[in-house]
Amino acid sequence: MKISFPRIAPQFDSESFTLVFPAMVDGTQIECGITAEALEDHFGAHSISETDLLMAFGGHRCAIEEATATLIEATRGAPVVLHSGVFRIYGR
């Protein structure tokens, strides 16, 4: 399975307090996300404000994309949302 991540800024979903970002899986784009809680707990976001979440994402993008790819492979290409517990299981 070929997984890549376009260098597009994530979008803030204010209803679910999630940053949403694309992944390309075997040439098809899927939508993935990471919760504000995960960004606060594991990547140093100071609050759930969009600015703080984007800063934390930008500073740890590689680790977030690595965890996302692991979950995409585990779900055979399905869109995923990374919650705080994911990083407790897979590490950071």
Image: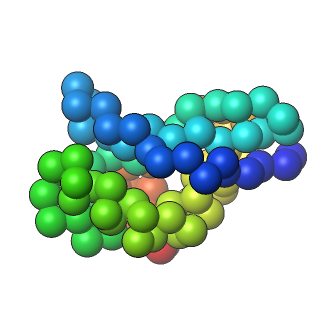
Place residue 70 in its image quadrant.
bottom right
Q: How many marks?
A: 0
Residue at the spot 56% in from the left edge and 68% down from the top edge:
62
Q: In the drawing, does residue 49 fall left or right of residue 16? A: left
Q: Does residue 80 appear in the picture of this structure?
A: no
Tell me which corner region of the image, top left, top right, bottom left or bottom right, holds residue 84.
bottom left
Q: Is residue 47 left or right of residue 14?
A: left
Q: Picture coordinates of residue 66 (x, y %)?
A: 61, 63
**Scheme by which the image is coloured:** rainbow
Residue 24 figure quarter = top right
Report the residue at 24% width, 38% height from top. Answer: 17
Residue 50's x, y, as percent? Answer: 22, 47
Residue in the foreground of this view, choosing between 60 and 8 = 8
Q: Position of residue 18 (x, y in %)?
A: 32, 40
Residue 33 lies, with reference to residue 46, above or below; the image says: above
Report the front residue among 72 and 54: 54
Q: Position of residue 75 (x, y in %)?
A: 68, 38
Seen in the image, is 27 located left or right of residue 6? right
- Name the residue at 84% across, 35% down: 27
Point 13% across, 57% down: residue: 47
Image position of 55 with respect to 2: above or below? below
Q: Is there any visible trace of residue 56 in the rendered image?
A: yes
Q: Residue furthest front?
A: 8
Residue pushed farthest top? 15
- Relative placement, left or right, of 70 versus 38 is right
The vertical placement of 82 against 13, above or below, is below
Q: Nearer the viewer, residue 12 or 40?
A: 12
